[in-house]
Amino acid sequence: MEEDLPIILSAKGLGKRLSLGDNTLTILSGIDLEIKAGESLALVGASGSGKTTLLGLLAGLDTPSEGEVTFEGQPFSGESEDTRARRRAESIAFVFQNFQLLGALTALENVMIPLELAGRGDAKGLAQSYLERVGLADRAGHTPRQLSGGEQQRVALARAFAAQPRLLFADEPTGNLDQATGRRIADLLFTLNAEAGTTLVLVTHDLGLAARCDRALTLEGGRLRVTEADAS
Amino acid sequence: MTEGLPRQMLRRQWRGVELRLLAAALLLAITTVTGISLFVDRLERALVLEASAFLAADRRLEGREAPPAAWEADAQAQGLATARTLSFSSMAFSDLEALLVSVQAVSPTYPLRGILKTAKDPYAPGTPETQTPAPGTVWVEPRVLLTLGLELGATLDLGAASFRIDRVLTATPDQGGAFLLAPRVLMALEDVPATQVVRPGARVSHALLLAGPEPALERFREALPEDLEARFDFEDVRSGNRSLGRALERAERFLRLGGLMAVILACLAVGLAATRFAHQQADTVAVLKTLGSPSGRIRRLYLGQLFQLAGLVTLVALALAYAVQAGLFQLLSAYVPVTLPPPGWAPLVLGAGTGWVCLLAFALPPILRLEAVSPVRVLRRDLAGLGPQGPVLRFAGVGTLLALLFWYAGSFELAGWVLLGLGGTGTLFAVLALALLRSGRVLGMQAGKAWRLGLAALSRRQGASVVQMLVFGAALMLLLTLTALRGSLLDSWRAQLPEGSPNYFVLNLDSADRTAFSDALEDLAVAPQPAFPMTRGRITAVNGNALDPRAGRAAARLTEERNLSWSGALPEGNEVVAGRWWDETAPAPGLSLEADFAESVGLALGDELVLEVGDQRFEVPLVALRRVAWDSLRPNFFIVLSPGLLAERDATYLTSFFLDAAQASRLPELLRAFPSVSIIAIDGLLNQLQQIIARVSLAVEVVLVLVLLAGALVLLASIQSSMDERLAEYGLLRALGGTRRRLLGALTIEFATLGVFAGLLAALGASVIIWALETQLFGLPQQSHGALWLWGPALGLATILSLGLGATRKVVQVAPLRVLREHGA
């Protein structure tokens, strides 16, 4: 990895606590990390280790109880929800385990949404071309219910890359798919990511998938543990 | 986000059940409100129109002198229709005989409301008449022809003028107001001077009749001088006829109450459907926010959808409501003989307005909470739901409901009672519902598998179950309240006019003829009613002070010559409200007045009154005030004397009897045998009253059906609210091996129990509300409503079970895998 690449995302002293009645549950604490532009990073760990919570904080979907997240050199986690939303619209994309397509819209319309939110012209043409790239040009008019799980995740990939984000978060992108489909989706994800040069933060408990990233960080009980992949 | 997205999403989301349910709730809300308003509006207008026929006008200005021409011009300038009448008694002569008649001279525009009916033969049924008697002619009641031995075309002399008898008068609209001693003669107003009968000081009654829109009538009334009451009576339908006035007032209250119940249910349904829609949309909002949509855009997106939907629904609902009420009236046209006034715009505005108020107060708050959904929901669905409900939003619904309640009730008293009933029973319901649920759970533990499953489902969703029981119970309670009230209101109306009520009044029966007349009635197999002595007299002095009729309205009313009677016993249907009735066996001289009359002329117990009857004068103390059941259609008197003050020969007798229509043809026999007797048919009056009552019950039925629909929708919306949870649970149970049959059994037990519990609560609530409304508001005697306790649970069981199973059938039909994939997360 090149040392002089700029840092796109960093977290300092990040923690998240939930109060449950009288008790406080610590989900994450003392997370420090830096992600360089163009890098691909895997966050691995057992169920309940706090991977998904960390992804939510890094992506500005949730706010930390302590510490801060900086995105492209600007404060991020302390900003208002609308400001964070605007910056997500400009630079960040997502792929989720359960696809998160809008059931009321067609595949094409789903891909168009982030383009329209970012104010891109020719949202329709761009969305169409990305659907072609994931091999679903002929399913553009179908709603998510008419698509299989693998097809839905391909639409989600088209939606993520069509916006030409600088940062992509993927939360267990193959978790809801059978092994063969999952492998094909992972191939597509890494291919598109390599073509676009996007920074990738991948949350997974699949070590094989994590191994395809530049480095991996392991979460245990809400804290980061340095892994062999990172050490190497 | 493009501006077209709301419409795009609206179109797509239309495929989902949530938006359809919201639209259906709104559609039913607006259709129900508009439909009821249109129907009630038209029916009220028809009722008022029909009731106005009793006055032959909307308002009637009546006095001893002619109302000034300037007032009539003023009324016409306000756009009101006017007519004049002049009533007086006179002797009418044929060549050989004379008869006292009651003459009504009318202007050509008479009557402004109701219809005249005439015939060509004394015993033919009348047909509607559009004209009034032409100058030089008169129309007479059959009795004039029979008594004077005349036929149509003959000449009748009135005072100095002669008239040709042109028609037989069978009905005049304002005949119900007075029981006239003498048969009626109708003539043209312009012929009156020629008779030379009406001279200064003569006892005549002038009336200016008015008809037109209510605001114009009000303006006209306000422009009249303040001392009007001293010289004129200004009557409307209510003051003109007491029993009808009360019936109308009750009808209006009832219809308003029905409208109000429908509004409350519709609002509940809209609120439930919108909350459900909002919960369904939380995921979408989280995704949109994750993709970078700020809160403002989310708000615009959903308000855009909501308003586009509401706009479309409003148009459809208004058209539907219009069609529904038009269809209803078309179906009913055979039973509704009067031409109904077309519906106005006001109900459409009211319906649409209420719909949107309901939308803003009940659908908007949950939709606005959507913008607060956190994007983190895409990762952890359980963490972030709808935003909190701010105090303003929380009170929007309650405040709006209160405002609507007062607006619809039109009276703080009515709204207050309904509110008290709803609020009080609501709290009690929640406590009782919880207790019932707990007892059900305990019982369920001892019962079979399906029972355990069904009852466990009820108590696991304890909060939702209590809310559902409240809603179901409230809907049922309203239905029971309406049904029971309708029954008791109609019963009390019918009780006022029992089967076999006298339909003929007999006047001028000489004391010497009483026995013979009674025998003649027995020959007709008719039971004679009690006979009352009757004479005419006037009060001339109070406590030693002579009264001057010109001193004011009260003195004028007091000194007017009136019918009076005497009786040892208190007449049936009378109640002494102040003072004491005299001893029946040894009565001391005394006089009793009708309480309202005494109050209006300023007389009090103990006043010494001088009474002038014919050439006799005597002083008598006022010893008792009576309340009189005017509804009863029995002979009633303002003034009743103790017996012994007047001799029997001083009076003629008044009695009544019931003769069925089949025997009516034998009346002429009776009339010929007793030529001095006047027999007045009050069938017309009875029929008019009964028609009004029939129409009121019809309106009540329709309102009831619409309320029932609104209630059913609330049920469905409320069941839909629990669908996600049910799908997940039953999907899991089926995956674990639960058979359809057992799960269906559990659903049946769940909804049946819910129905019976809700029915019990409803019966309790309805009993309380009915008691309050009946005894405190409508002034009806307390009645037993034991059947509520049977009908409540039975209706609850039938309705909730069928609607519940219908709506949740899907949970045992959809493949368990699909259910788990879609709803198990």
Image (cartoon, coloured by chain):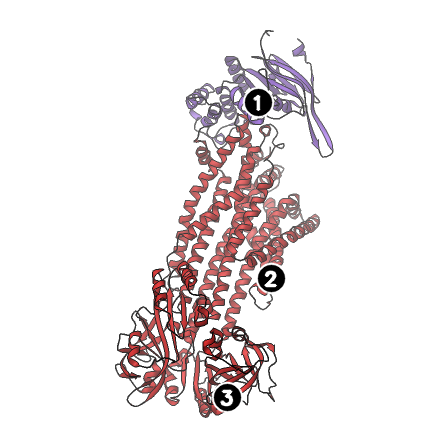
Chain colours: A purple, B red
Q: As drawn, is B160 to the left or to the right of B684?
A: left
Q: Secondary structure at mark 3?
A: strand
Q: Of the residues shown, which amino acid type is indicated by label 2?
A: Ala
Q: Residue at x 47, y 85 (%)?
A: B535
Q: Crowding at label 2, few (<14), some or many (≥20) Cα neighbours within 10 Å? A: some
- Mark 2 vs mark 3: which is more N-terminal? 3
- Compute the Cα span from label 2 to label 3: 51 Å
Q: Residue at x 53, y 54 (%)?
A: B406
Seen in the picture, residue B204 relative to B300 is either above or below; the reply is below
Mark 3 vs mark 1: in front: 3
Q: Of the residues shown, which amino acid type is indicated by label 3?
A: Arg
Q: Which residue matches tag 1?
A: A174
Same chain for mark 2 and mark 3? The answer is: yes
Direction right: furthest residue? A22
Q: Position of residue B704 (x, y in %)?
A: 50, 57
Q: Of the residues shown, which amino acid type is indicated by label 1?
A: Thr
Q: As drawn, is B142 to the left or to the right of A204?
A: left
**Which chain does tag 3 point to?**
B
**Residue B617, numbered label:** 3
Q: Are marks 1 and 2 in contact (CB under 8 Å)?
A: no
Q: Is residue B610 visible?
A: yes
Q: Which residue matches tag 2?
A: B772
